Image (cartoon, helix red, strand yellow):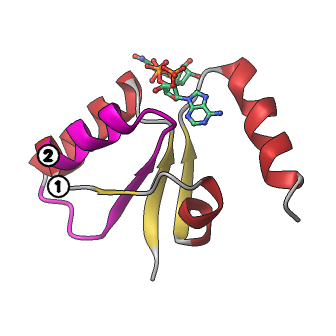
Amino acid sequence: MSAIVFIGGGRITSALVAGLHRAEYPEEIVVHDRNPKKLRALERDFGVAVEPDLQAAIATADMLIIAVRPPAVAEMLDARLRTV
Ligand SMILES: NC(=O)c1ccc[n+]([C@@H]2O[C@H](COP(=O)([O-])OP(=O)(O)OC[C@H]3O[C@@H](n4cnc5c(N)ncnc54)[C@H](OP(=O)(O)O)[C@@H]3O)[C@@H](O)[C@H]2O)c1
């Protein structure tokens, strides 16, 4: 499977996903976030697929969009590199 994957399901992801939804973007969109409530809202409002597991989300990515705040990027890379 290939998809656009958003890492972070906050404000900018919500705005971008809303635009893609409105434009009837035809490919799969996957969102990963550590907050299940945010994932459920994005799933409900925009029909995206949600993936609570970081590794699984990355594995589906044809295009990966990092949408967390700058300090969280290093944290996420650490988590990712610990598993390779
Ligand atoms: N908002 C804008 O208009 C805008 C415009 C252009 C660019 N940007 C850039 O886009 C990036 C994201 O901004 P944003 O406004 O969307 O931030 P945000 O609303 O805080 O969203 C980031 C999301 O990522 C989650 N997150 C953080 N660390 C995580 C981790 N290790 N694992 C899983 N999820 C994690 C956050 O969860 P928590 O809430 O639990 O921390 C939050 O839900 C920033 O670099 C910002 O500069 C934003």
- Separation of residues labelled 1 and 2 (CA atoms): 6 Å
Crowd around label 1: few <14 · some 14–19 · many ≥20 (10 Å): some
Q: What stretch is highlighted in magenta?
A: 24-44
Viewer-proximal residue, 13 or 78? 78
Q: Mark 2: which secondary structure?
A: helix
Q: Residue 54 location, x and y as percent?
A: 61, 53
82 relative to 57 in the view: left or right? right
Rendered image quadrant of residue 55: bottom right
| Image position of 42 with respect to 82: above or below | above
The question of residue 34 being in magenta is answered with: yes
Residue 44 circle label? 2
Badge count: 2
Viewer-proximal residue, 61 or 78? 78
Crowd around label 2: few <14 · some 14–19 · many ≥20 (10 Å): few
Q: Residue 81 location, x and y as percent?
A: 87, 53
Q: Mark 1: which secondary structure?
A: loop
Residue lying at 12% horizontally and 59% vertically, measured from the top left = 24
Amino acid, disc 1: Gly
Point out the residue furthest to the front here.
36
In which quadrant of the rendered image does the C terminus lie? bottom right
Residue at mark 1: 47
Amino acid, disc 2: Arg
| Image position of 72 with respect to 52: above or below | above
Residue 77 circle label? none
Residue lying at 53% horizontally and 71% vertically, measured from the top left = 60
17 relative to 78 in the view: left or right? left
